[in-house]
Image: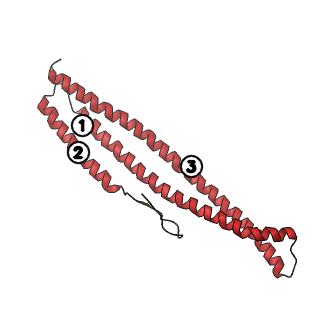
Amino acid sequence: MTRKKILGSHVKRLLSGVSDHGKKHLTEVETDLIQTELLLEEAIDKLTSSFMAIHTAVGAQQDTINLLLAGGTPSAEDGARLGGMSDEIGAHVNTAITSMQFQDMTSQLIDRTLKRVTGLREFLGTLGSHGADIVPEAGSEEIVELLGKVSMALAIQSLELRSVLRKAVNQQHLESGDIELF
């Protein structure tokens, strides 16, 4: 093989290999992120269950209050339980709100990461498709020209990807205050 054919063959193999390898890994990352999001949704379902438990506790508390308002006398056990319920319910509500804020911010991070993964996959796809255009018989000038086109296309894609991604992750769905992460 001549020097030109060797150069073209190596560049083609390199670009195609980087593209294939990168796309496979990014697809796995994307799958993991989607599974993570499903797990977070399950966590929210569990929070909902916690809120229902809180509702049940508040209902029991209200029953004791209604007994008092009706002139009845609660048992010593009812009195002790009533005394500790407010603090317990408050702690559960605070924990649930904090968890929901975490889920909101995590969802934003996952969404941003999925956009990044999709952009990187497209980035690597561009690298692979341009690499396929290099033939082993191509001259050094042709290879240099093609690599220049690849570099320009990748630079444009990189800027486009950067413009869609935000740096900060903000709390968006709760009225209990604002939190900014990153």
Compared with 5, 82 (above or below) is below
Distance Cα–Cα, label 1 vs label 2: 10 Å
Name the amino acid, label 1.
His
Query: Residue 153 shows which numbered tag?
Result: 2
* Residue at 78% across, 70% down: 82
Residue 20 vs residue 88: left or right? left
Identify the element where label 3 is drawn. helix
Of all residues shown, which one is farthest toward the left? 141
Query: Residue 130 shows which numbered tag?
Result: 1
Say which quadrant the C terminus sits in: bottom left
Decide which of tag 3 and tag 2 comes sooner along the chain: 3
Q: Mark 2: give few (<14), some (14-19) or many (20+) Cα within 10 Å.
A: some
Query: Residue 39 shows which numbered tag?
Result: 3
Name the amino acid, label 2.
Ala
Assess whether mark 2 and mark 3 are in contact (beta carbons under 8 angstroms).
no
Query: Residue 58: horizontal and vertical position, in percent?
Result: 73, 69
Residue 66 vs residue 51: left or right? right
Of all residues shown, which one is farthest toward the top? 1
Say which quadrant the N terminus sits in: top left
